[in-house]
Each structure stands twice: as structure tokens, then as C-alpha cells.
Image: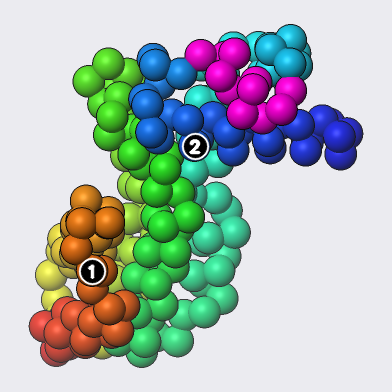
């Protein structure tokens, strides 16, 4: 793909995310996407082929990619609280960056469950990394013995709940300060230490 085509594709993807996060998949037309991206409808079709293909491209780029695994592995210290905070901050950064895609998946969960399922499957990859981390930490004697997947789910569900509650309250109430993440992780880490 040439640089010009990449820029066009990026504009189309960005415009689509903005429109669909506000109106939902079915309510957005290719004509609207083209107008928002400042391209012709033919360019949209030539670049992606269909509105569904645009959405598929958005979902493919959502939440998880190989560099995340590498980034986590590179930054692990095997000090429980430090690592859980790093993993949690990375998770929140990814969710915040992709909150519009998340909104699309929630809006369309009944009419297009495959979108929500696709995001769920990508989140499972993140969960796998955290589960493997807890397995290693148990072997090192730095985490209480137990089911590492349950331990990972506890951390991920806390983070997911924090993200969703902040998203749902966005613009309605003042946001909670991010410094409470460190405090919450300290509490979780304390419960996991032998």
C-alpha cells in the first residue's frame, strides 16, 4: 500500500470510528463516511470494498497486537505491585485509545454480536499474558498459590470495571483521579502476596 493509500485508509477508518461511535453501525452510510473523510464514495469502496470491511479493519487493529506482549515482557520486574501497575496502566491506555471502538461494539452487540465477540477474543489474549505472569510469580513464591487465571481475571475485571464506569460517567460527573489506580493496585497486590 502506498503512503497516499495508507493516509486515505487511515482517514476513512478514523472517520468511520467517529461516526459509528455516535450513531452505530447500521445508521452510518458509506456516503457519510466518504464526506467525513473528505474522499469520494468510490474511494471508500476502492480502499475497503464495503462498510463491513471497514469495520473489520477497525476491529483487527483494536486492543491487542504483538508489541503489547513484547512491551509487557520488556518491562516486567517480577516485583508484584510494580508489574501489576504497569500492566494496568497499559491496559487503560489501550482502552482509552480505543474507547470509540468499544462503544461501537456495545451499541451493536445485539445486531452484530460478532463485533463484540471479536473484541472479547482479543481481550482474552491480554488475559493469557497476565495469567502466564501469575504462573511465573507463583513459581517464584511471590504470589499466593491458587488458580493463576482467577488471579488474572480479578485484576482484569477490576481494570475493565474502572474503564467502563469512567466511560459511562464521562461528561456527567467529574472523573476520578488516576492516582487511585496506584492505590487500588496496592490493595490487590497486598491480597496476592504470600
According to the picture, the residue beneath numbered tag 2 turns out to be 18
Q: Residues within 10 Å of mark 2 (few under 14, many from 20)?
A: some
* Direction from residue 55 to residue 27 in the image, left or right: left
Numbered circles on residues, count: 2
How far from the left and from the top, in percent, is residue 140? 31, 85
* Direction from residue 140 to residue 36 in the image, left or right: right
* Direction from residue 19 to residue 130 in the image, left or right: left
How far from the left and from the top, in percent, is residue 169? 20, 56
Image point (59%, 59%), residue name:
67
Image point (34%, 39%), residue name:
103
Secondary structure beneath dot 1 equals: loop
* Direction from residue 30 to residue 161 in the image, left or right: left
**Residue 119 figure quarter:** top left
Residue 124 painted magenta? no
Secondary structure beneath dot 2 equals: helix
Compared with 55, 149 (above or below) is below
Q: Residues within 10 Å of mark 1 (few under 14, many from 20)?
A: few
Image point (36%, 41%), residue name:
102
Q: Quadrant of the C terminus?
A: bottom left
According to the picture, the residue beneath numbered tag 1 turns out to be 174
**Residue 38 figure quarter:** top right
How far from the left and from the top, in percent, is residue 91? 39, 63
Amino acid at each position: 500500500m502506498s503512503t497516499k493509500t495508507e493516509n486515505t485508509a487511515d482517514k476513512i477508518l478514523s472517520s468511520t470510528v467517529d461516526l459509528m461511535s455516535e450513531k452505530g453501525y447500521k445508521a452510518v452510510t458509506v456516503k457519510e463516511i466518504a464526506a467525513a473523510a473528505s474522499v469520494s464514495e468510490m474511494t471508500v469502496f476502492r480502499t475497503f470494498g464495503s462498510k463491513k470491511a471497514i469495520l473489520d479493519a477497525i476491529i483487527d487493529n483494536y486492543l491487542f497486537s504483538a508489541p503489547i506482549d513484547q512491551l509487557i515482557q520488556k518491562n516486567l520486574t517480577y516485583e508484584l505491585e510494580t508489574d501489576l501497575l504497569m500492566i494496568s496502566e497499559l491496559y487503560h491506555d489501550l482502552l482509552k485509545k480505543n474507547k470509540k471502538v468499544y462503544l461501537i461494539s456495545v451499541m451493536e452487540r445485539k445486531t452484530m454480536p460478532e463485533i463484540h465477540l471479536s473484541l472479547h477474543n482479543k481481550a482474552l489474549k491480554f488475559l493469557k499474558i497476565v495469567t502466564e505472569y501469575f504462573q511465573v510469580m507463583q513459581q517464584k513464591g511471590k504470589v499466593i498459590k491458587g488458580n493463576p487465571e482467577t488471579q488474572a481475571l480479578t485484576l482484569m475485571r477490576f481494570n475493565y470495571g474502572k474503564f467502563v464506569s469512567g466511560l459511562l460517567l464521562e461528561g456527567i460527573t467529574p472523573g476520578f483521579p488516576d492516582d487511585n489506580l496506584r492505590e487500588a493496585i496496592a490493595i490487590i497486590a497486598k491480597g496476592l502476596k504470600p
